[in-house]
Amino acid sequence: MTLSKGRTMRERLPQGGRIDRSRRVAFTFNGRVYDGYHGDTLASALLAHGVRLTARSFKYHRPRGIVGYGVEEPASLVELLGADASGNEPITTVRIRDGLRAKSVNCWPSLRFDIGGVNQLFARVLPAGFYYKTFKWPDWQLFEPMIRRAAGLARAPTQPPANGHYEARHAHADVFIAGAGPAGLMAALVAGRAGKRVFLADEGTEAGGGLLTRRLRIEDRPAMEWVADAVAELAAMEHVTHLQNASVWAYREHNLMMVTERSPDHDSLLERSWRVRAGRVICATGAIERLLVFPGNDRPGVMLASAAQAYVNRWAVRPGRRAVVFTNNNSAYAVAADMQAAGIEIAAIVDARPQVPPEALAQVAGIDVLGGHVVVRTRGRMSLRSIAISPLAGGATRSIACDLLAHSGGWNPAVHLFSQSRGSLRYDETLAAFVPDIPAQATASVGAAAGLMTLPEVLTSAAATGGDVPRAHEAAYAIAPLWRVQAAGKAFLDIQNDVTVADVQLALREGYDNIEHVKRYTTGGMGIDQGKTGNINIIGTVAQQKGLTLPEVGSTTFRSPYAPVSFGAVGGLRTGEVQFPYRHTPITEWNREQGAVMYEAGARWQRPGYFPQPGESFQETVNRECGAVREAVGVYDGSPLGTFELKGRDTGRFLDFLYTNKMANLKPGHGRYGLMLTDDGLILDDGVALRLDDYRWILSTSTGHADAVNQQMEKLLQTEFPDWQVMVTAVTSQWNNATVCGPRAREVMEALGTDINLDNAAFPFMTFRDGTVAGLPTRVVRVSFTGELSYEINVAPRHMRKLWDRVMAAGAPFGIQPVGSEANHVLRVEKGFLSLGHEVDGTVDPHDLGMGWIMSAKKSDYLGKRAVALRRAADKPRRELVGLLPDDPNAQIPEGAPLTPGGRKEATEGLVTACVWSGVNNRWVALALLVNGRTRQGETVHVRLRDEVIAARVTAPVFYDPGGQRLRS
């Protein structure tokens, strides 16, 4: 990447800053190549080149520049391109690197000439809430595509990152500290020296917080030297974890903290997500400067005072040549002094307070201070050229030429995490801000996050639990609140969402006087920045308009995430074992040796999905495995199925209550298929119950619902039937099984050698026998999940690999094939067997699935019986299980696709639950849930897809051996 000739960093200060001037970095912004230094952000590098215009506003497409210097940035969002593809990144948080490509969002065809700027001409007819009233007729969908295209946000990346991956980790700590400014570092030192396990996370690229941007001293030396010593001491403590560039974005129940680490310690990692459980949480999150509200406060060149100070001190950049400082508090005076020391001409300090405290004036000797004045207007098209000021009490206006207006409306403690923890807030009159009040969890706020605004107070509060407090000095903080300047013109309360004072006044006139309603009606505080710089000004404006105090108005709810978080980081990478180990059967190694594609099944089991042979496609593999089961013989590992042994004199009647059909009359040596319902009459699980003797039973459940069934049984026995004698033992891991299935299964069993009589009359379907098979002690069950003759051979885990090897050897002459879960899925769809992950979708009951026969009419009660009766008493149309045969036999229907009348874009009448290629039918077949489906067999229905409509004929939900002769053969 080559820098264009003549493009220099003309606003870079000759010295200072925390940047590495030996490492130049080239990057592209809006198609132009710029350069900066290692340590620059995109914002600081552009300011160094004198770039003021960086964005267009969300609704009006007004020119916007850089306002903040961190996650609080409300005005300039960028879209990252190429390998870094990401949307809506605050320009102030993007670190530049060689080859970085970024562009402004919400502008076309270019940033300087944006067609959307025409919206400014129609601003009067585009107030808050106009879209609620305007786009109702004739149809919202008519306008939706246009509105979405006009929305001022970037496009989501279309591809995942080309290189690297995300990771998720878990940790435990005695003390979790959010923020590594002076308060966080002091708290970490105290806890670390006491031997506590400390987890310290900070969103900045380096520790120091506000000390990075100000010229303060601790122990009579530069404050950053104290920071360096503190970081080094913490690094030497093995029990301390210290993360930088790590955003603490959520505070959950029981002190669970969510952290995204954006610069992990491994080149292949993009981001790492942490879930940290802490005994105590310390919020050392600092404070955020807020805007002053006056006409034209969004113009490029109007910047938060703290941001101007940060660019001067941390990045050695002049954000302007001639500046005016506008404030209502003491903190801006140190900003003026720092800018003047950097060579920026300070034209004036405009202070809304008639009487400026002496300690503030002492910092700016020689600078013109205009007390009791406010800014009433700004001028300039694409950047600031001048401002107009006026006495607050009224009088003539005066113009001041300037290219930078650094303004400060005071400081808000960053209470976001404390509020997420459900702690309450109170309004502090002396700070004109909301501060933490009563905690709801084991948490405490320290430093500026607790409303302590000077460095000595910050260090003292953080060291409250013990330790010496370093000596420091900072001028006292004082403020006179100014919620808005009374002057004509657009004054923005929320710069990101283009929310003005007039918008809030309109909301109040229309009856939205609750602060939460104001927020939603105007969208104030609902942007990516979540109103960090403007929320309290909205509250203050509402209070003034209604004649209330701020505590009476109240604050809005702070929700996670505190800062934007990528979906990749939230999900993390979970292709391997993370917190819970995978569960394996003794056949896992064999499966992998055969090249099986392994899936994660329910309850964390690793199971083979399919066994591809060289040169085979996925569909060819599945077809081959299905063909083996239908025409010869296959074998699958059924070990992950849940297995429970129940014992006791009341087991029979307990199972009668648990299942919808009768179980107590089952004879020893026999089994029966059954359904379990939940309390609300929906299907919980299906499986087989085997009776061993009068008081002992074996229950087989689905893999994924085994734990839920166990919980259901224990709950019933402990709360509903505590006097019943039933003992439940989970024996899933004590039994493994190889299920031999197919028309030649009996021949394979005979070839294995067994003392069990395999004749169908002696060993019929739904019975079991104990004996030996292949020289191993076994329990063999005649049960089928494929629709074919099947023998489920159960052995102890220590015998499973021997059994499997012997089955494969004995079955080789008969063409035996190992079968994965994909083929099993096809086989069960052909037979119309239900699947808990497909047909059982949380809305259907057994009657809907055509299984009313299993709902016993002889039993007085069973779990869910009354709930089913109540639901069906409404006599409303229900979705019922049907089969579908596409008119085009080669048309595959995506699972989950909606069925709509005539394929039109209207309310759905059902959905496709499964669709597979059926080898025995030589076509695609599907199962679906269709309104009144059983009465509609023979009809043609339509599947609506994005680009086409597929016609299909409704049939019975079974496509193979409807009488079940083959599985009973």
Image (spheres, rainbow, N blue to C red):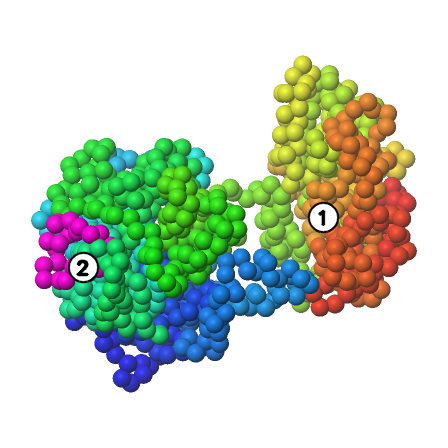
Residue 350 % position (x, y): 22, 59
The secondary element bearing badge 1 is classed as loop
As for residue 648 lying within the magenta part, the answer is: no
Q: Is residue 921 above or below residue 117?
A: above
Q: Amino acid at mark 1?
A: His
Q: Is residue 543 above or below residue 822?
A: above
Quadrant of res 653? top right
The secondary element bearing badge 2 is classed as strand
Q: Is residue 554 left or right of residue 204?
A: right
Q: Which residues make up the magenta segment? A: 350-369
Q: Is residue 479 left or right of residue 419?
A: left
Of mark 2 and mark 1, the one earlier in the sequence is 2
Q: Which mark is residue 838?
A: 1
Q: Give the foreground label among 2 and 1.
A: 2
Q: Amino acid at mark 2?
A: Leu
Total label count? 2
Q: Which residue is under mark 2? A: 370
Please state, as top left, top right, bottom left or bottom right, where the C terminus lies in the image.
top right
Residue furthest out toward the top: 723
Residue 471 % position (x, y): 12, 43
